[in-house]
Amino acid sequence: MELSILGLALLFAVTAALYASVGFGGGSTYIALLALAALDYRALPVIALLCNIIVVTGGTIRFQSRGLIDWPKIWPILLLSVPAAWLGGRMVLQQESFMLLLGLSLAAAGILLIIEPFIKRAGAPSGQWTSHRLFAPATGTGIGFLSGMVGIGGGIFLAPILLLTRWADSRRIAATASVFILVNSIAGLAGQLMKSGWSSGGEAILAYWPLFLGVLLGGQIGSILASKALPEIWIRRLTALLILYVAVRILWV
């Protein structure tokens, strides 16, 4: 699938607007679009993580201003997820291994987006699992490591788990996911750039500056609109279909 850099920038802007309106960064969809465009697989995580950072920074600031970020409750999740994301970013994978892991991760993300409404209704009694002292660090570590390796922020995996365990109300879970995506994207990006070399990695991504401008503008639009144009459930379903389509294409080859 041939996509020009300007065409990708437009799709990235739309993606950022949709995800920002519901508190996410869009890393899984950026990865999917980049995979469709047949870019060098080594560039995919770096570009997607940087786009994540651009989008969720504004969302995190917005959630903080509204008092929705419960830092004492969040830090156990972040404690080990940040070094795990950095370590995941440092992992050197061959193209076949990376694409397999990416395809499986996208498939899981797409399925989670589809079943999330059912997860909300079928959640465990509040505190049943989350009261265990290992729940938060174990969850953060696993998701953080995977996020760093494939180049997604991890919120798309964290939010359904928190919803299932009724860790908090949906607004505070969205705020937690936003913070999680931000810090793990920064850690994962650091690991990716250290793996490829700071100078060479930085120079390589400069060629994709229209994508970063696109998500910056799209993220601002999404924050303003706050999903008024399209119900959140349809945003998630359409995103899930795209992600699953790309996952099938990657795994089928």
Image: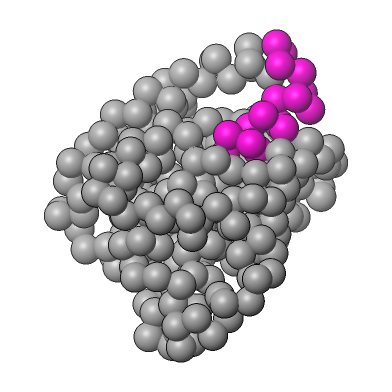
Q: In the image, is residue 82 above or below residue 244?
A: above
| Magenta span of residues | 185-200
Q: Is residue 109 visible?
A: yes
- Prevalent SS, magenta region: helix
Residue 183 image-quadrant placement: top right
Residue 190 image-quadrant placement: top right
- Determine the residue positioned at 61% across, 65% down: 136
Name the one closer to the observer, 50 or 124. 124
Name the one closer to the observer, 183 or 209. 183
Q: In the image, is residue 173 above or below residue 11?
A: below
Give the color scheme: rainbow, by chain, secondary structure or one colour: one colour
Residue 97 pos. (x, y %): 81, 50
Q: Is residue 109 left or right of residue 239?
A: right
On whether residue 199 falls in the magenta region, the answer is: yes
Residue 7 pos. (x, y %): 39, 30
- Residue furthest toward the front? 72
Q: Is residue 7 left or right of residue 94?
A: left
Q: In the image, is residue 9 above or below residue 35?
A: above
Q: Is residue 88 left or right of residue 151?
A: right
Residue 195 image-quadrant placement: top right
* Quadrant location, the C terminus: bottom right
Residue 247 pos. (x, y %): 60, 58
Q: Is residue 174 left or right of residue 146?
A: left
On whether residue 213 falls in the magenta region, the answer is: no
Residue 137 pos. (x, y %): 66, 61
* Quadrant location, the N terminus: top right
- Determine the residue positioned at 49% across, 60% down: 73
